Image (cartoon, helix red, strand yellow):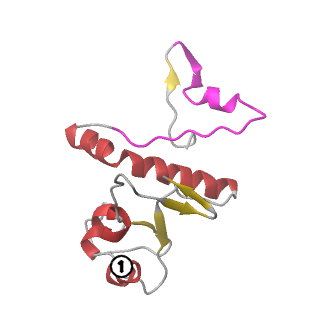
Amino acid sequence: MRKYYQRRLPEDPSKDYYYIIRETSPMQSLLVEYGFIDNANDRVKLQNNLLDYVEAVVRAIAQYAGVTYVPPEGVTTYTVVRGDSLWSIANRFGVTVDALRKANNLTSDALQIGQILKIPATSSDSEGSYYTVVRGDIIFMGNNEYY
């Protein structure tokens, strides 16, 4: 990156904005830039997709460091392989193609091999089954009764 983009410090032209990162030895530094906000649409896109961008950076850093990436608890992901389509992935996980598109901010059905998709929760995952406890209910746990 420094080879292609260097912005010099006004107070010391012998240094660029990345000199601090290079001076952190023996630790390895990493600079992450999510993008540039040039207009209101860029700002909205960043706001609407911030968690996706952050998760992508964490995944990329894990891959770079050679450690296993573990998505946040409750998030199911799928890595696209040859022959996959949105329909086949949606069908495999019991979700709709529209839900898959929406969860991944997809504007087309085109997929890339190796692309990591978030799988949205199915309605049964998110709704669950609820019961309201009423007076007189008993919970049995092993040999114990709880009132």
Give the residue at x 50% y 39%.
Answer: 5
The residue type indicated by label 1 comes to: Gly
Q: Which secondary structure lies at badge 1?
A: loop
| Quarter of image, res 69 | bottom right
Residue 120 can be seen, yes or no: no
Q: x, y (%) of residue 25?
A: 76, 32
Count of all numbered marks drawn on residues in the image: 1
Residue hosting label 1: 94
Asked if residue 59 lies in the magenta stretch, the reply is: no
Asked if residue 20 lies in the magenta stretch, the reply is: yes
* Highlighted range, magenta: 11-36
Give the residue at x 34% y 49%.
Answer: 49
Q: x, y (%) of residue 31?
A: 56, 38
Q: Nearer the viewer, residue 73 or 97?
A: 73
Q: x, y (%) of residue 140?
A: 54, 63
Q: Nearer the viewer, residue 100 or 125?
A: 125
